[in-house]
Amino acid sequence: MNSQSGQPLESVDLTDARIDDAFWSPRIETVRETTIDFVHERLADSGRIENFRVAAGETEGEFQGRFYNDSDVYKWLEGACLFLVTEDDDGLRERVDEVVDLIAGAQEADGYLNTYFQLVEPDKKWTNLHVLHELYCAGHLIEAAIAHREATGEATLLDVATAFADHIDRRFGPDGEDGVPGHEEIELALVKLYRATDEERYLDLARYFVDRRGAADSRLKYEAFNPDAIAGEPYDHVVDGEEYDGRYFQDHAPLREQETVEGHAVRAMYLYTGAADVALETGDRELVEVLERLWENMTERRMYVTGGIGSSHEGERFTEDYDLPTAESYAETCAALGSVLWNQRLLRLTREARYGDLQSRTLYNALLAGLSLNGDRFFYANPHEMGRDGHPLHDVDPNRFANERQGWFQTACCPTNVPRLLASLATHVYASDESSVYVNHHIGSEATLDVADGTVDVDVETSFPWDAETTVTVTPSEPVTFELALRVPEWCVDASARVAGEPVDATPGEFLRVEREWAAGDEVRFEASFPVRFLSGHPNVESTAGSVAVQRGPIVYCLEGRDSPRPLHQVRLRANGDVAVEHDPELLDGVTTLDLPAFVPDESRWDDGALYRPVSETDVEPTTVRAVPYYGWANRGPDEMRIWLDAESGEHDRPE
């Protein structure tokens, strides 16, 4: 680990940090005021909450929806509780209490809790781990329970989650039944439960699930080939004749032997996050090296420019190196969230700025695009290109790949996931150990941290993501010596900083580190430039050949049809031309736009009605097209959209 002490950083507690940021605060408030209530209504309307009422015996009825629907209730509950940590809300607390009471009432005497199995297949519990999500749902229950105790000080839900975790611990592990979750999540949740209770057996079980995955005698493989022995149905797309393809579940080899990111992208992110959490607690350096190897494969060969991951609609999965189609990209919102969580752990383990850089890329682009500006519409899959008629360019699932965000999905993981991340965003900004304070993100905020046997208040004011000016003010309880580290994003140029008026080095892609005696009111003033960058894809990425994407700061831009004088397929960007950068406080709740120089066909050359003509008889004319942040697309109605556009060659980084 790249620290003097060899110990990982600790994230700040949500009770000790608060976001106060011109960009993020309005979005978080929209989620608090709109999204949380909207999602709760959908959970009630879709029968997800009613399932617990039926399982508790409060009413008669049948199970409604998909077998993993419990998890959506738990994720909503976690997000709601995280908001209650930072702000009292009597109405929200009443809804939380009602749901908690229903969950507690539905639990069986032995600790088991899963409304699908309790109401549909009670005699086949734990027989279909690879499909039916029992362990996945249990993980989200545990996370919700920890957030509930933090918000309320009560142990009601934590007692429920602990009883279920004990039930699972009695059943699985080295001294029990063999098995791992088909959909990972419980691994990271068990580590959280260990931290909350100091019960080593929860950490041991998490480590067991991480290390048992990919065994030669895989339980998931057995289930796939023995449909008569399991509840529900097996996944047919992991079996090819007599061959088992465990890549979908990251079950093709033990994690420590895996070389490439494989399979269902959300599953992979939760597995890697859980493994990183195990490493955080155990100091398992080998596991960290495995995760670094997988991260490099993902970021160098299997990730979109937005930070989106999982390119294929079939299986919502990673496929192969450089397979990143733009016209039918998947890039599920939940996978982006999982990437943010994984990179937070990697940053804590290694103290390397590159993991914070990827968090920022993903937050501002792949994650934020999944939520509408008004907070009640969602993308499940996130297109990187949309056809001129406002429909996908290829035949894909219209419920998960569309030109406008949807109000709900039968599989509602994304609408319930985004609130819990944004509610906890402050915990990603800061980290510390006994001698260091890390400011990982340029997000306006304040925090109180314990360092050097004292207490330090840190306040961040910033113009990010539109401009690169940040001031970090440090106020220790008394003068004290420690290291302050501020991430200098990789997309900065001409970066400079002053500490208490004295210049210090600031290298893009690294942490600016200053160790000194800090006194109340000491400041780190950071500034840099955000050039407009025209990015090329690797030559092996077929879909981006001859095209460029545009990025400024952490923001990836796109073109929507309404901002172009011609259909987007006619636009060819001039990557060596001047770009006009302007902040529009009214557009899309306030964005910085880029007016890009471009060429379009000279239509006068086609006035004779010819369908084809020699190139020598055609011409182009100059024009300007306006690019907007990708996260803001589809907020002004259905439209065509492209991130990657044809371009002439030239110098690709343009100053403002």
Image (cartoon, rainbow, N blue to C red):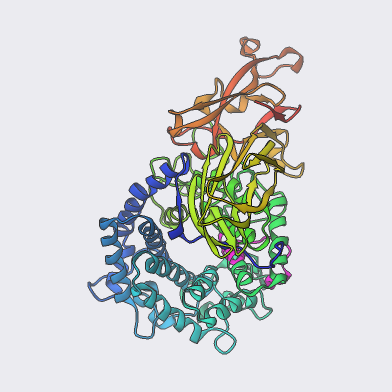
**333 w.r.t. 57: above or below:** above
Q: Nearer the viewer, residue 418 or 476?
A: 476
Image coords of residue 101 (percent x, y):
28, 71
- Whether residue 543 is visible to the viewer of this picture, yes or no, is yes
User: Left or right: 70 with respect to 526?
Assistant: left
- 94 relative to 204, above or below: above
Camera-nearest residue between 369 and 361: 361
Q: Which residue: 40% across, 62% down?
A: 78
Considering only vertical position in the picture, is 501 above or below 148? above
For the question of whether residue 260 can be seen, the reply is no
Picture coordinates of residue 84 (x, y %)?
Answer: 35, 58
In the rendered image, residue 416, in percent from the top left (x then y), is placed at 42, 56
Kindly identify the residue that appears in the image at 26 percent across and 57 percent down: 90
Magenta stretch: dominant secondary structure: helix
User: Looking at the rendering, which quadrant does residue 87 occupy?
Assistant: bottom left
- Quarter of the image with the N terminus is bottom right
Is residue 338 found inside the magenta-colored segment of the image?
A: no
- Residue 175, by quadrant, is bottom right
Residue 257 part of the magenta-drawn span: yes
Q: Nearer the viewer, residue 179 or 4?
A: 4
Residue farthest to the bottom, as pictured: 175
Residue at image position (30%, 66%) is: 99
Looking at the picture, tell me which residue is in the foreground, 68 or 105.
105
Count numbered badges in the picture: 0
Q: Residue 507 at x, y = what percent?
A: 72, 43
Q: Quadrant of the C terminus?
A: top right
Q: Tell whether 278 sits left or right of 170.
A: right
Side of 566 where 602 appears, left or right: right
| Magenta span of residues | 254-273
